[in-house]
Amino acid sequence: MLLENVRLSNFRNYVSLDVEPLPGLNLFVGPNAQGKSNLLEAIAMLATGKSFRAHRESELVRSGEALAEIGGDARIAAGRVRLRCAIDRSSGGTRKTFDVNGATVGFARFLGRARVVSFVPADLALVAGGPALRRTFLNVALAQVSPAYYRELALYQNIIGHKAALLRGTIAPDRDLLLAYNDELTRPGRALIAARAAFVGEIAAAVGGIYDRWHATRERISVRYAPNAAEADLAGVLAANVDNEIRRRQTLVGPHRDDLRLELGGRPLAAYGSQGQQRTAVLALKVAEYEVMRTRAGDAPILLLDDVLSELDADRAGGFLAAVGAFEQAFLTTTELPGGVGREMTAFAIRDGCISRLAC
C-alpha cells in the first residue's frame, strides 16, 4: 500500500498540515521536539486507531483546542481508501470517532484498512522488558491482518477481565462461576494460541537472515513462541489451576500470560546481547513482521521508523538505509540528513510543526 496524503489538524504540535509522501523511503529531518515523532504517531493511528506513545489520548489534542483530526488517502490492493480519525476532548472525557470513505464506522471496521509496522525507541524494551510488551507486539500485528483475531482477542480480554474481578473480590469467589468463565475462555484462548504460534513461526523463519545481513556474526538470532499453556491442553490446565487461582486471587493460566523468547546463539538476548545487538535484533524483528504482514495480506504495510539511525555505526546505517529504500513505502525520522542519500529517497525538513521538501 502507499499513503498518498496525510492531513493533520490540531494534533500534538501541528496546527494544520497537509503533506504528500512519495513511494520508497521518506526521510523527515529536524532537531528534537519539532514534530517528527508526532507525524509518525499520526500515521500509525490511521492504521491501528491507537497511539503507540500517549499515556492519555487527551494528550493528542493540541493545547487549548477541543478537537484533533488525522486524515489520509491511501492506495491499497483493493483500490483507494480515505481514512479519518478524530479525537474529541471535552470535560466529559476524550472520545474517538472513525471514518472510512466519508462514512462513520466502529473501531473494528476501521482497524486494518491501512497497515503499519512501527519502530520507536521504546520498542528496544521488547528484548529486556516484560512479557506484556511482547504480547502487545503480537496483538497489534495480528489484529491488523486478521479481523477474526481481533474479535477473539476482544472476547478473551472481556472474559478474563470478569474472571480477574471475581478472583479479586472481597468474598470468596463462586467456584461454579469461575468454572463457567474457564469454559468460555477455552475457545477464544485456543484461537489466540494457534494464531500466535503460526505468526511467530513465520517471523522466526525470516528474522535470522535479516539480522545476518546487518550484523555479520556466527551467532544466530532466534525467536520462539512461549505459550503459557499449549492449545490442546488449555482446558485441562485451566481446570487444574482453579484451586491455585482461588488461593492466590489472580488468573494464572491462558494466553494473557504468553511470551516470546529472543535468543542469540542459543542464549537469552536480554542477558547476553550488547545494546547494539539488541537494537539490531529488534529492527530485524520489525522487518520480519513487515515481510510476514505483506505476505499474509497480499499488500505491503507502511514502515515507520523513529530515530532508528542514532545508535547504528555508519556501515550498518548505510546497509539499513539501502534495504529500507527498496520497500514500497517507509517513513524515517532523523536529526540530520545521513550520508549517501540517493535520488530514490525523499527528504523533508520539519521545524515547529511545519514541513518543507529538501533537495538531496
Image (cartoon, helix red, strand yellow):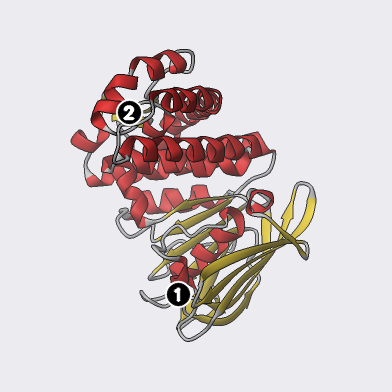
* Residue 270 image-quadrant placement: top left
In terms of depth relative to the viewer, which is nearer, 316 or 226? 226
Q: Position of residue 44 (x, y in %)?
A: 54, 58
Q: Residue at x 44, y 18 (%)?
A: 234
Q: Position of residue 36 (x, y in %)?
A: 45, 70
Describe residue 265's horizontal placement relative to residue 253 as left or right.
left
In terms of depth relative to the viewer, which is nearer, 86 or 124? 86
Which residue is the site of mark 1?
35
Q: Tell me the amino acid under the disc marked 1.
A: Gly
Q: Position of residue 279 (x, y in %)?
A: 32, 46
Describe residue 132's horizontal placement relative to residue 44 as left or right.
left
> Does dot 1 land on a helix, a strand or a loop?
loop
Check if mark 1's residue and mark 2's residue have beta carbons within 8 Å.
no
Placement of 356 over or under 347, stated as above or below: below
Which residue is the site of mark 2?
252
Q: Residue at x 38, y 41 (%)?
A: 165
- In the picture as drawn, the residue positioned furthest to the bottom comes out as 64
CA distance for labels 1 and 2:
42 Å
Q: Tell me the amino acid under the disc marked 2.
A: Leu
In terms of depth relative to the viewer, which is nearer, 110 or 221? 110
Q: Residue at x 63, y 53 (%)?
A: 107
* Residue 97 image-quadrant placement: bottom right
